[in-house]
Amino acid sequence: MDDFDLSRLEAIIAERARSGDAESWTAKLFSAGMEKAAQKLGEEAVETVIAAVARDKEAVVKESADLLYHWLVVLALSGVSLNDVMAELRSRTGRSGIAEKAARAKPPSAG
Protein backbone atom coordinates (compact mmCIF):
# COMPACT_ATOMS: atom_id res chain seq x y z
CA MET A 1 0.00 0.00 0.00
CA ASP A 2 2.87 2.38 -0.67
CA ASP A 3 0.66 4.54 -2.87
CA PHE A 4 -2.05 4.98 -0.24
CA ASP A 5 -2.48 8.56 0.95
CA LEU A 6 -5.24 11.00 1.82
CA SER A 7 -5.90 11.71 -1.85
CA ARG A 8 -6.54 8.02 -2.47
CA LEU A 9 -8.81 7.87 0.58
CA GLU A 10 -10.67 10.93 -0.70
CA ALA A 11 -11.26 9.13 -4.02
CA ILE A 12 -12.46 5.95 -2.27
CA ILE A 13 -14.88 8.01 -0.18
CA ALA A 14 -16.27 9.72 -3.29
CA GLU A 15 -16.72 6.36 -5.03
CA ARG A 16 -18.46 4.74 -2.07
CA ALA A 17 -20.64 7.80 -1.46
CA ARG A 18 -22.11 7.39 -4.94
CA SER A 19 -22.46 3.61 -4.64
CA GLY A 20 -25.75 3.50 -2.77
CA ASP A 21 -24.48 0.26 -1.21
CA ALA A 22 -26.55 -0.47 1.92
CA GLU A 23 -23.50 -2.19 3.43
CA SER A 24 -21.24 0.84 2.98
CA TRP A 25 -20.69 3.03 6.04
CA THR A 26 -19.63 5.83 3.70
CA ALA A 27 -22.84 5.61 1.66
CA LYS A 28 -24.87 5.59 4.89
CA LEU A 29 -23.03 8.66 6.20
CA PHE A 30 -23.63 10.57 2.97
CA SER A 31 -27.27 9.56 3.05
CA ALA A 32 -27.60 10.72 6.67
CA GLY A 33 -26.18 14.12 5.74
CA MET A 34 -23.90 16.73 7.20
CA GLU A 35 -25.28 16.70 10.73
CA LYS A 36 -24.45 13.01 11.24
CA ALA A 37 -21.07 13.28 9.50
CA ALA A 38 -20.11 16.33 11.55
CA GLN A 39 -21.24 14.60 14.74
CA LYS A 40 -19.03 11.62 13.92
CA LEU A 41 -16.10 13.94 13.15
CA GLY A 42 -16.50 15.57 16.54
CA GLU A 43 -16.72 12.21 18.31
CA GLU A 44 -13.54 11.00 16.63
CA ALA A 45 -11.73 14.23 17.50
CA VAL A 46 -12.62 13.80 21.16
CA GLU A 47 -11.61 10.12 21.10
CA THR A 48 -8.27 11.09 19.55
CA VAL A 49 -7.67 13.68 22.27
CA ILE A 50 -8.55 11.17 24.99
CA ALA A 51 -6.13 8.63 23.51
CA ALA A 52 -3.39 11.26 23.29
CA VAL A 53 -3.85 12.39 26.88
CA ALA A 54 -3.76 8.75 27.96
CA ARG A 55 -0.53 8.37 25.97
CA ASP A 56 -2.02 5.31 24.28
CA LYS A 57 -0.05 5.24 21.03
CA GLU A 58 -2.06 2.41 19.44
CA ALA A 59 -5.35 4.17 20.22
CA VAL A 60 -3.97 7.47 18.87
CA VAL A 61 -3.17 5.74 15.57
CA LYS A 62 -6.60 4.11 15.30
CA GLU A 63 -8.56 7.17 16.40
CA SER A 64 -6.52 9.39 14.09
CA ALA A 65 -7.42 7.13 11.17
CA ASP A 66 -11.10 7.44 12.10
CA LEU A 67 -10.70 11.20 12.50
CA LEU A 68 -9.09 11.66 9.08
CA TYR A 69 -11.74 9.49 7.40
CA HIS A 70 -14.63 11.42 8.94
CA TRP A 71 -12.88 14.73 8.22
CA LEU A 72 -12.69 13.81 4.53
CA VAL A 73 -16.39 12.87 4.55
CA VAL A 74 -17.25 16.29 6.01
CA LEU A 75 -15.05 17.98 3.41
CA ALA A 76 -16.82 16.10 0.61
CA LEU A 77 -20.26 16.95 1.97
CA SER A 78 -19.12 20.60 2.17
CA GLY A 79 -17.95 20.61 -1.45
CA VAL A 80 -14.37 21.20 -0.30
CA SER A 81 -11.52 19.13 -1.72
CA LEU A 82 -8.37 18.00 -0.01
CA ASN A 83 -6.53 20.12 -2.59
CA ASP A 84 -8.41 23.19 -1.33
CA VAL A 85 -7.20 22.53 2.21
CA MET A 86 -3.66 21.77 1.07
CA ALA A 87 -3.56 25.02 -0.91
CA GLU A 88 -4.58 26.92 2.22
CA LEU A 89 -1.88 25.19 4.24
CA ARG A 90 0.67 25.87 1.50
CA SER A 91 -0.22 29.57 1.58
CA ARG A 92 0.53 29.65 5.31
CA THR A 93 4.01 28.12 5.16
CA GLY A 94 5.75 31.40 4.37
CA ARG A 95 4.99 32.91 7.78
CA SER A 96 4.94 31.83 11.37
CA GLY A 97 1.80 30.34 12.86
CA ILE A 98 1.67 33.21 15.35
CA ALA A 99 1.79 35.81 12.56
CA GLU A 100 -0.79 33.91 10.52
CA LYS A 101 -3.19 33.71 13.46
CA ALA A 102 -2.71 37.42 14.22
CA ALA A 103 -3.53 38.26 10.61
CA ARG A 104 -6.86 36.44 10.94
CA ALA A 105 -7.84 38.35 14.11
CA LYS A 106 -9.42 41.53 12.87
CA PRO A 107 -9.76 44.33 15.45
CA PRO A 108 -13.21 45.92 15.70
CA SER A 109 -13.48 48.99 13.51
CA ALA A 110 -13.48 52.33 15.27
CA GLY A 111 -16.32 54.47 14.61
Image (cartoon, helix red, strand yellow):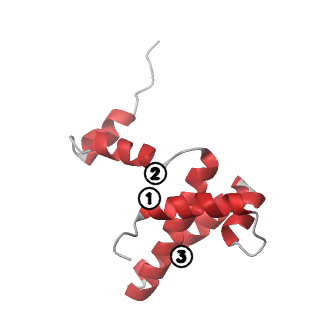
Q: Is residue 45 visible?
A: no
Q: Position of residue 111 (x, y in %)?
A: 47, 12
Residue at the far top: name it.
111
At mark 1, the secondary structure is: helix
- The one nearer the camera, 72 or 60, is 72
Q: Residues within 10 Å of mark 2 (few under 14, many from 20)?
A: some
Q: Quadrant of residue 80?
A: top right
Q: Amino acid at mark 3?
A: Glu
Please name the residue that numbered disc 1 is placed on.
7
Residue 96 in percent (x, y) is at 22, 45
Residue at (60% x, 70% y) in the render: 43
**Disc 1 versus disc 2: nearer the observer:** 1
Task: Name which quarter of the figure residue 105 lies in.
Answer: top left
Q: Are marks 1 and 2 in contact (CB under 8 Å)?
A: yes
Residue 3 lies, with reference to residue 56, above or below; the image says above
Give the labeled residue for mark 3: 47
